[in-house]
Amino acid sequence: MSKIIRCHYQLIETPLELEKVSDLFKKEKAIAVDLEADSMYHFKEKVCLIQMATPDINVVIDPLKTEDLSPLRPLFENPGIKKIFHGADYDVRSLYRDFKININHLFDTQLACMFLGMSETSLEATVKKWFKVGLNKKYQRKDWSKRPLSQDMIAYAATDTLYLLPLEKILQEKLKKLGRLSWVKEECLYLSKVRAASANHEPLYLKFSGAGRCDSRSLAVLEALLQYRKKIAKRKDKPLFKVIGNNSLMKLATIRPYNLNLLEKTKALSPRQIRIHGDNIIDIIKKTLKMPESSLPVYPHKKASPLPPQIPRRIKAIKQWRDTVANDLKIDPSLLFNKAILTTIALQNPKNIHSFQGIKGIKNWQKNEFGKEIISILKNMDN
């Protein structure tokens, strides 16, 4: 097992300390950034640590003690300072959700690894490949909201940013040689604008995998059980899966046991879960089983309009071309064009480069690099 790498760092726990370190960061050209959160332990997840590093500065900021992070906003919004993350999607969403921090000039080293065709792109695998160092990930799934944090946990957090600056330089150079740097930069621009899903009042089953296969009665039971689980999770401040798992809920909604004996036979819940939730679940199912047919929900399946026969042929032709190109480039085909964009291209059948501007989701690098080839494929099919 790899050891915790000891590095010099400063723990930031007061507004004055944050102000001082923010002033230092303003002079930098690039800053490595990482976060630790508590999504495995609480109903409402939150950022628990922010790690930021340059060659001369390495800090671990505690937002649970320094609640006002407004001094950091100008740093993250400054386009003259590059912010380097590894796997930035979650971090970008979390920084905006918790602190309203916008990020300009982001570079994601994991995304860079993907466009270089690396099969393993985790930070652990990447650091081992380029620096021959094994990162210790023993604290990855710990509860980062607990205070005080051990010195080992803080040291662990501080090491995650140590390699991002030199790693970014290596990856940029390799991307430049392959002519893919502009691709990654544009993808990072879009990535910097992602946001966490906002709360709404839609039925919970709409975001539940497999709900679309349920009949109306099972769907009603599922929604009632989902609402119950959410209420309990919120009250106990636990993540949803630690109350009742998704597979268990689906099993209960499908079988619909209406007494404790039948509930035990489903084996959907542990004996402990039955002791805690059994009576409530039976009451929920009984009540839902009495609902009149007219009150039962209907899953809103999106019926796709029948496609003209030439559209599937276009999709197949473009997909075959894409897969061949991706194989030559040694990258995942979906990085070049995902299924949704392939379908939109086939539907719109662009005749020239300017026609790509109306295709939702397509990036400039895709249009500029591959637009002419796609137009040629489509023209040949029409002839």
Image (tube, rainbow, N blue to C red):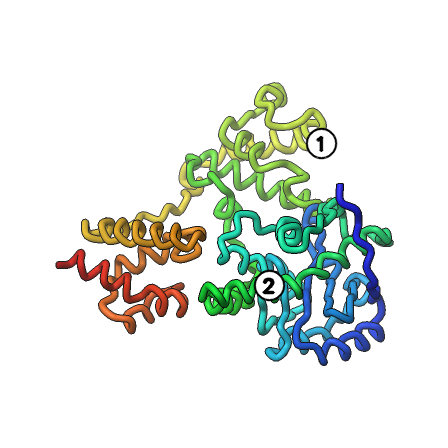
Where is residue 90 shown, x and y percent of the image?
Answer: 61, 57
Q: CA distance from mark 1 to mark 2?
A: 54 Å
At numbered mark 1, what does the secondary structure look like: helix, strand or loop? helix
Q: Is residue 273 above or below residue 180?
A: above
Q: Amino acid at mark 2?
A: Ile
Q: Is residue 330 visible in this depiction of the protein?
A: yes
Residue 276 numbered mark, or none: 1
Which residue is found at the position 63% from the left and 69% from the top?
Answer: 83
Which residue is found at the position 55% from the left and 66% from the top?
Answer: 173
Q: Which residue is more in the foreground, 187 or 246?
A: 187
Where is residue 138 shown, x and y percent of the image?
Answer: 75, 44
Q: Amino acid at mark 1?
A: Ile
Where is residue 320 shown, x and y percent of the image?
Answer: 30, 49
At numbered mark 2, what does the secondary structure look like: helix, strand or loop? helix
Q: State which quadrant residue 325 falls in.
A: bottom left
Q: Is residue 238 above or below residue 358?
A: above
Say if mark 1 contacts mark 2, CB within 8 Å.
no
Q: Which numbered disc, 1 or 2, marks the residue closer to the eye? A: 2
In the picture, the quarter occupied by the C terminus is bottom left
- State the residue lying farthest toward the left: 383
Q: Which residue is more in the foreground, 81 or 216?
A: 81
Q: Is residue 69 left or right of residue 81?
A: right
Q: Which residue is more in the foreground, 172 or 23?
A: 172
Q: Residues within 10 Å of mark 2 (few under 14, many from 20)?
A: few
Q: Which residue is mark 2?
A: 170
